[in-house]
Structures are given as structure tokens and as C-alpha cells.
Image (cartoon, grey):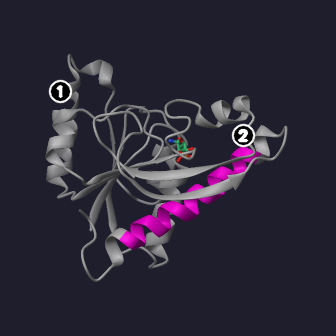
């Protein structure tokens, strides 16, 4: 399956997915990494893996629709079939949702529906939860609201955000690989 990974930051999930592909665990090819942040570290990770980057600043476009049309043109050129969001800090609008119905997934560092949106980890720690986790879900028009595909729990390391965050990221990298194997490697095509 030809995929595009969307990221706005470090790109550790992108790297984990690409390494899963290189190991032969995931039956997919990352055709392009799409980012809204030209300087994001994910662009370095993609370059190191010889994967093209499409870095478009939304500010260069006079509407979200125009911005997504520009992305869509590149996705079509690369014959991308499925979008994988990994630390992409923008909502996906109607242009991309309509072009890829039920073919966009996202990873979120909490057990949705708890703690949607920004800084989910900070929200969970502030609330004092003892167990948090990771969710992979289909993307719909809402923020972190689409149908849940898989979840995994992570114990909070009391009073230590850094260790908790590291534990969450390790589980993210594992879970995304498992979800993509489940979606793409299966004999029956499970992609809805
Ligand atoms: C991850 O925690 C992801 O769940 C959240 O943003 C972070 C991205 O990390 N959406 P990275 O850029 O993949 O390292």
C-alpha cells in the first residue's frame, strides 16, 4: 500500500513506521512525508531515509481548502492510497477527508475519549490518572474523534513526566506498527 505520513514535529513515529517497513513487518511504501513545518526535525529523518518531503507552510495559502488542494495534488502525483498522521498538529479538512474517506488514521497519546487535543500527556498527568495510554483511530472531521482501531495502556510513572512520556512514545511506535500490519498485511483487505 502506498502511504503518506503527515508530521509536524520530531517524526519519531514516522521513523518507527519506516523501520517497520524496512524490516518487512509492514507491507507498505512511504511515498512522501507531508509537513506543515518546513524546519521540523521529521524532514531530517525523511532525508536520512531518502523519502521525499512535501513541506508547505499554511501561511502561504489564502485558505485551508487551497492548502489541502496543494497537498492533494502531490499525493495524487505519488499515487498515495492512505494517509498516516503522526504528530500532525492540524485538523484535516473536507478536501482531504473527501479524497481519502476512511483512509486516514492518527495516533494520539492518551486513551481516547479521555484527553483529546493538545498536550494529552500533560492533561492526563494534571488529572492525576494512574494509567494512561495510546490510541490509533480513523480520522473524521472532529479532533481525535474518529472510530478507534487499537489502544494500549501505559502506567504513569508517578511524578515523572519524562519517564511517562518515554514509555508512551515506545508504545506508540509498537502500536502503530501493529495497526499498519493489521490494516495492510491481512489477506482480506481490512482497510474500510
Ligand atoms: C506523538 O506523541 C503523537 O501521538 C502526537 O504527537 C507526538 C508526535 O511525536 N500526536 P513524533 O513527531 O512522531 O515524534
Nearer to us of marks 1 and 2 is 2
Residue plotted at (19% across, 34% down): 94
Total tally of numbered discs in the picture: 2
Across and down, in percent, residue 66 comes to: 16, 26
Residue 167 magenta-highlighted:
yes
Residue 53 magenta-highlighted:
no
- As measured in the structure, the alpha-carbon distance from the residue carrying label 1 to the one carrying label 2 is 39 Å
Across and down, in percent, residue 125 comes to: 72, 34
Q: Which mark is residue 129?
A: 2
Residue plotted at (19% across, 49% down): 100
| Residue sitting farthest toward the right | 159
Mark 2 neighbour density, 10 Å: few (under 14) some (14–19) many (20 or more):
few
Q: Is mark 1 within 8 Å of ligand 1?
A: no
Position above or below: 16 against 67: below
Report the image quarter containing ligand 1: top right
Across and down, in percent, residue 13 comes to: 52, 53
Q: Quadrant of the C terminus?
A: bottom left
Looking at the rendered structure, the secondary structure element under dot 1 is: helix
Looking at the rendered structure, the secondary structure element under dot 2 is: loop
User: Which residue occupies the foreground of this view, 157 or 111?
Assistant: 111
Mark 1 neighbour density, 10 Å: few (under 14) some (14–19) many (20 or more):
some
Magenta residues: mostly which secondary structure? helix
| Residue sitting farthest toward the bottom | 187
Across and down, in percent, residue 37 comes to: 42, 31
Left or right of 80 on screen, residue 147: right
Q: Which residue has dot 1 on it?
A: 65
Q: Which mark is residue 31?
A: none
Badge 1 or badge 2: first in the primary sequence = 1
Left or right of 87 on screen, residue 31: left
Left or right of 27 on screen, residue 76: left
Tell me which segment is drawn in magenta.
164-182
User: Which residue occupies the foreground of this view, 37 or 162?
Assistant: 162
Amino acid at each position: 500500500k502506498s502511504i503518506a505520513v503527515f508530521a509536524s514535529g520530531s517524526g519519531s513515529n514516522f521513523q518507527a513506521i519506516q523501520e517497520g517497513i524496512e524490516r518487512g513487518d509492514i507491507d507498505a511504501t512511504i511515498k512522501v512525508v507531508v509537513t506543515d513545518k518546513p524546519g521540523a526535525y521529521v524532514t531530517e529523518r525523511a532525508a536520512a531515509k531518502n523519502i521525499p518531503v512535501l513541506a508547505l507552510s499554511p501561511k502561504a495559502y489564502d485558505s485551508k481548502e487551497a492548502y489541502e488542494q496543494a497537498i492533494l495534488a502531490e499525493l495524487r502525483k505519488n499515487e498515495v492510497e492512505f494517509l498516516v498522521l503522526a504528530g500532525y498538529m492540524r485538523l484535516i479538512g473536507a478536501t482531504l477527508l473527501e479524497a481519502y474517506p476512511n483512509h486516514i488514521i492518527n495516533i494520539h497519546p492518551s486513551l481516547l475519549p479521555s484527553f483529546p487535543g493538545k498536550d494529552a500527556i500533560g492533561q492526563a498527568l494534571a488529572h492525576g490518572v494512574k494509567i494512561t495510554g495510546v490510541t490509533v483511530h480513523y480520522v473524521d472531521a472532529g479532533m481525535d474523534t474518529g472510530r478507534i482501531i487499537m489502544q494500549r495502556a501505559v502506567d504513569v510513572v508517578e511524578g515523572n513526566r519524562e519517564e511517562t512520556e518515554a514509555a508512551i512514545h515506545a508504545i506508540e511506535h509498537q502500536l502503530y506498527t501493529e495497526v499498519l500490519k493489521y490494516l495492510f498485511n491481512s489477506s482480506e483487505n481490512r482497510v474500510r
